[in-house]
Amino acid sequence: MFKQVRDLHLQFGINHERIPFTQEEKDFRTLAMIEEVNEYMNAETKHDELDALIDVVVFALGTAERQGMLDVFKEAYLRVMEANSKKEIGQNAKRNNFKIDLVKPEGWKAADLEDLVSDSKQIEMDFGE
């Protein structure tokens, strides 16, 4: 999946090495992912649900690529899953107290991802498109 997303961005000349990621693109990608989640929520068939879920993943991985995070995504995923495995089944008021949510027990620690990415801002460049 990572290679396919990278190849797609290379095909269209929009990979992170060619065009810097901007706040405008972050806003666009956020809205696109929300749109795909809404499509999932409103889907009336299993194949429409599956299509929407795939689109969410494609946009999420595409966003990771655009931000130059694709190479560390797998390691970050493994760390987050390890941390999540230490959660407990419970209810979360932020998510309507669904009965089988994962909640953070006392002393739970989030995955440390700081060594994988830098918070330094990318400089926006005009490539004269």
Image (cartoon, rainbow, N blue to C red):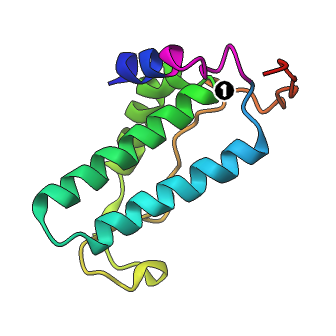
Left or right position of 4 against 124: left
Within 10 Å of the Cα at label 1, are there few (<14), some (14-19), or many (20+) other Cα atoms? few
Q: Which residues are magenta?
A: 9-19
The image shows residue 94, relative to residue 86, as above or below, that is below
Q: Main secondary structure of the magenta part?
A: loop
In this rendered view, identify the residue nearer to me: 89 or 14.
14
In this rendered view, identify the residue nearer to me: 77 or 43.
43
The image shows residue 28, relative to residue 62, as above or below, that is below
Residue at image position (59%, 33%) is 113
Q: Which residue is mark 1?
A: 117
Residue at image position (46%, 62%) is 35
- How far from the left and from the top, in percent, is residue 16? 64, 21
Left or right position of 110 against 54: right
Residue at image position (61%, 23%) is 14
- How far from the left and from the top, in percent, is residue 76? 48, 31
Query: Is 32 contained in the magenta span?
Result: no
- How far from the left and from the top, in percent, is residue 55? 35, 46
The image shows residue 74, relative to residue 42, as above or below, that is above
